[in-house]
Image (cartoon, helix red, strand yellow):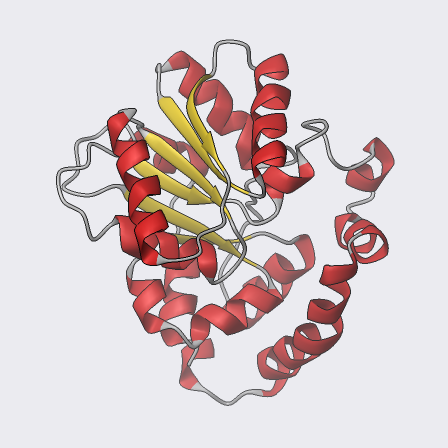
Amino acid sequence: MNALINLKLKSAPSTEELLASLLVDHDEPVSVSFVNPYSYQILAQRPDLLNALDHLYCDGVSGAKLLSWRLKCKIERVSFDMTSLAPIFFRFSEENNLRVYLLGANQKEVEGSRDSFLKTFPKLNVVGARNGYFSNESEMTKACEDIFSKSADVVIVGMGTPKQEEFIKYIKSYSNTGLKGIFTCGGFIHQSSLKAEYYPYWINKLELRWLYRLLFEPHSRKRVFKYYPKFLINLLFSKDSSWQ
């Protein structure tokens, strides 16, 4: 169950190498996602989605430490938010004139996030901002066509696991799209709709983002109490060879 996901975590490139790969021509876009104990368990059961992802990172401090211990190699915490990869990516996009498309949350939130990002990164070229809700495959097709028509270089997808990875799989079924990269971002678009810096300074300083979300995001509580203990038990006691 864990072999493919653990292999991708162990082989993830540095963020510098990852961003540099966006400037290299590929037959298809570089696809990247980020896992926590909840999404780890969902994706471990979906090899079709894992096969659609080129790189996978651990997005939590505690999870990265536990995985480093269990897998006997250094697993860095990398998350697509303002405490980690997002500002680095936005600056890189400004410097290299990348055309960015935002997909996720509801329409008001994704447009609010776009405006928040542009306040901090005024040279960021956001060519599209669409909500992440699809009632059928036809609407997903139209979203892809909009992305292609705007000649987007990178798509940031924030729809939660597994929907965001399913979208990656779907858009990668097209050929000659011109896309350079696709990144998932979970709830980042929703969180950034009012301001780019979602977490208070002291929460970031003490690395208590998990507690902040537990207190202020009701949907996170179910995931924490249902999935996190299962992940911890599997990580600590599983005899599966994939943990080697």
Question: What residue is shown at x 50% (from left), y 71% (from top)?
Answer: 42
Q: Is residue 140 above or below residue 195?
A: below
Q: Is residue 214 above or below residue 188?
A: below
Q: Quadrant of residue 218?
A: bottom right
Q: Would residue 76 be found to the left or right of residue 212 on screen?
A: left
Q: Quadrant of residue 241?
A: bottom left
**Residue 88 vs residue 224, the one in the foreground:** 224
Q: Position of residue 31 (x, y in %)?
A: 33, 47
Question: What residue is shown at x 41% (from left), y 32% (from top)?
Answer: 16
Question: What residue is shown at x 45% (from left), y 53% (from top)?
Answer: 164
Q: Quadrant of residue 150?
A: top left
**Residue 172 vs residue 76, the one in the foreground:** 172
Q: Position of residue 106 (x, y in %)?
A: 58, 41
Which quadrant: the C terminus?
A: bottom left
**Residue 183 vs residue 91, the one in the foreground:** 183
Residue 244 appears in view: no
Q: Residue furthest top?
A: 123
Q: Would residue 139 be found to the left or right of residue 67 on screen?
A: left
Q: Is residue 223 above or below residue 178?
A: below
Q: Would residue 234 be found to the left or right of residue 135 on screen?
A: right
Q: Would residue 36 be found to the left or right of residue 180 on screen?
A: right
Q: Residue furthest bottom?
A: 239
Question: What residue is shown at x 59% (from left), y 61% (from top)?
Answer: 36
Total numbered badges shown on the rendered structure: 0
**Residue 175 vs residue 201, the one in the foreground:** 175
Which quadrant: the N terminus?
A: bottom left
Q: Position of residue 71 (x, y in %)?
A: 50, 69
